[in-house]
Amino acid sequence: MNVLVINAGSSSLKYQLFDMTHETVLAKGKVERIGMETAMLTHEPAGKQEIREVSEILDHTAAIRKVLRILVHPKEGVLESMEQVHAVGHRVVHGGETFSGSVRVDEEVKREIKRLFDLAPLHNPGALTGILAVEANLPDVPQVAVFDTAFHQTMPPKAFLYPIPGVFYRKHRVRRYGFHGTSHQYVSGRAAELIGRPLSELKMISCHIGNGASVTAILHGRSYDTSMGMTPLEGLMMGTRSGDIDPAIVPFAMDKEDLSLNEVNSMLNKHSGLFAVSGGLGDMREIVEAAEQGDRNAKLAFDMYEYRLRKYIGAYAAAMNGFDALVFTAGVGENSALLRKTVCDNLTFFGVKLDEAANARPGGGDRRISADDSAIGVWVVPTNEELMIARDTFEASRAALQPST
Ligand code: ADP
């Protein structure tokens, strides 16, 4: 069975086509600048050369059509016909309190994703557009929605509620939802396999640190607490997001700098974090390079980023009364040996002992980076949200695809 995974944003769309027999990727790619004359399709069929095509793509429906055409193209394609796309899985950022797992898309699910627009105004509209665009092109193919928030629906009220008047929760659904759930779930499951013990017996802390970043306390396989909140702004310091700050800074900044709501929102989401502290660098590679060359602001940005991450790890160790494993994933977590080393060298109190050589060894793949006698296992597990979406889509649509007996 082949599953097409779609991650649709407001003007872009990423895709990956899986053959679920062996969970292999047949092709992947993206369409950027949807809605413009210079839209670009980048298509990477497995084992063949990547191709790029610039053309006018007016909307998501046209973008999906373009993707399907290239998937069945006699030369660049990987399928013989569109009937070989058996199911489509979508990444949907916000599932609110309605979705604690992946679901087959129907009218009610679409309505609910729409109802959640005000909680994720930048993300959910793109996902719904993607769903409608697939429906327009492949009306009979089952579609499945996989939510970034779903994994965190197991958090207890003491972790998900904010200590503010209850009306905000009851009337406006203000609470911690958490994000990157698909990634935290994937890497914790994979780490348990590598450890060789059931997830249900383990206490884990997973650090998804890329451009966006979050930490999750995973108690016996279930999300117990996570650093992102009602929106993906809370928690860790990120590439351009502030993460935790005193909320009183918001009205104060609005007053002193005469900022509008939109401006203060943009300041905290797009002009803060590593970018603000380093004086214009948002990428961890550039920060580390600049710091090594003596740039003090870059060094401060790195130190703050690492310190804030380490404080969360400490907090979650306390939240779960200890932990067995620490997992690093996403762009920074998978690639920055320096960040991992700095964090781990300051967690010796917990019995964390790094295997310096294993940590410094370049190259991807799942790996243990703690010493044999470390009390806590430290792991690098490259995330694979697309595979997780494909698996959920396969499971949720299998019943619909099997001939009834
Ligand atoms: P996104 O949240 O957009 O999916 P990624 O998980 O791809 O982001 O992470 C992107 C970030 O990973 C970049 O901002 C970059 O700082 C960081 N990164 C990638 N490679 C390295 C590296 N070798 N060393 C340090 N940071 C890296």
Image: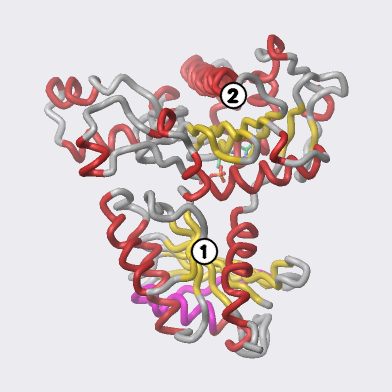
Looking at this rendering, what residue extends furthest in the right direction? 372
Q: Secondary structure at mark 1?
A: strand
Q: Secondary structure at mark 2?
A: loop
Q: Is residue 52 visible?
A: yes
Q: Quadrant of ligand 1?
A: top right
- Give the total number of marks visible in the rendering: 2
Residue drawn at x 34%, y 33% as measured from the top left: 271
Q: CA distance from mark 1 to mark 2?
A: 36 Å
Residue drawn at x 57%, y 31% as measured from the top left: 217
Q: Which residue position is annotated with label 1?
A: 14
Q: Which residue position is annotated with label 2?
A: 320
In the image shown, does 26 or 202 lie closer to the viewer?
202
Is residue 102 in the magenta section?
no
- Asked if the residues shown at circle 1 and circle 2 are in contact, with their CB atoms under 8 angstroms apart, the answer is no
Residue drawn at x 20%, y 23% as measured from the top left: 253
Mark 2 Cα shell of 10 Å, populated few (<14), some (14-19), many (≥20): some
The image quadrant of residue 274 is top left
The residues colored magenta run 49-68
Q: Is residue 21 above or below residue 212?
A: below
Residue drawn at x 59%, y 88% as measured from the top left: 83
In the image shown, does 238 or 102 lie closer to the viewer?
102
Mark 1 Cα shell of 10 Å, populated few (<14), some (14-19), many (≥20): some
The residue mark sitting in front, 1 or 2, is 2
Mark 2 residue type: Met
